């Protein structure tokens, strides 16, 4: 873990972070949903998430594509915004409150911060090593 923290500039630099950005691309094969062997039902996703650690906010922009869907229904876009006041989904169809599970998960991410997360990982490794002894 220390090598990873050092590669990111050291503990001193991680503590000063005010925001973290994550960009991800996903590919899902729904194997259990197909009675046939191959090709399986596929889905693709692109996510751009920003954790604003200084102000306790999260914004996640997600775009999903289901190529086997009906015409005009294969793509969806949704933005999740969570702050101290609550959370909301912004979509083409309108806005809706986010679920309690999403709200709690976002708040946990914001509370951890980058260094606390690294410390938790180190503690977990120590506990695992103690169990093996």
Image (cartoon, grey):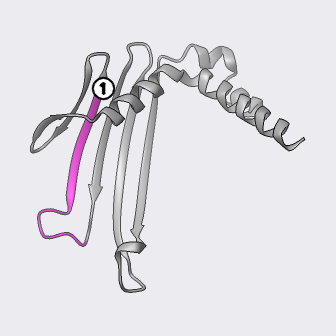
Residue 8 in view (yes/no): no
Camera-side residue: 83 or 74? Answer: 83
Q: Which residues are magenta?
A: 68-81
Q: Residue 130: x and y, percent?
A: 84, 36
- Tell me if residue 33 comes above or below residue 96 in the rendering: below
Q: On the picture, is 92 further left or further right than 68?
A: left
Residue 125 in view (yes/no): yes
Camera-side residue: 52 or 126? Answer: 126
Magenta stretch: residue 73 in it?
yes
Q: On the picture, is 100 further left or further right than 130?
A: left
Q: What residue sits 25% from the left and 38% below the top?
A: 79
Q: Residue 20: x and y, percent?
A: 47, 27
Q: Residue 131: x and y, percent?
A: 82, 40
Q: On the picture, is 48 further left or further right than 125?
A: left
Q: What residue sits 74% from the left and 33% below the top?
A: 1
Q: Residue 25: x and y, percent?
A: 42, 52
Camera-side residue: 40 or 98? Answer: 98
């Amino acid at each position: 873990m220390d090598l990873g923290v050092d590669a990111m500039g050291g503990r001193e630099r991680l503590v000063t972070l005010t925001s973290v950005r994550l960009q991800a691309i996903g590919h899902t094969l729904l194997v259990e949903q197909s009675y046939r062997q191959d090709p399986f039902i596929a889905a693709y996703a692109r996510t751009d998430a920003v954790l604003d650690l200084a102000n306790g906010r999260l914004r996640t922009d997600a775009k999903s594509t289901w190529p086997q869907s009906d015409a005009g229904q294969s793509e969806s876009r949704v933005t999740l915004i969570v702050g101290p006041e609550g959370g909301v989904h912004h979509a083409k169809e309108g806005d809706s409150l986010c679920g309690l599970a999403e709200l709690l998960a976002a708040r946990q991410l914001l509370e951890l911060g980058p260094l606390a997360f690294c410390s938790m990982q180190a503690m977990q490794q120590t506990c695992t090593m103690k169990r093996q002894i």
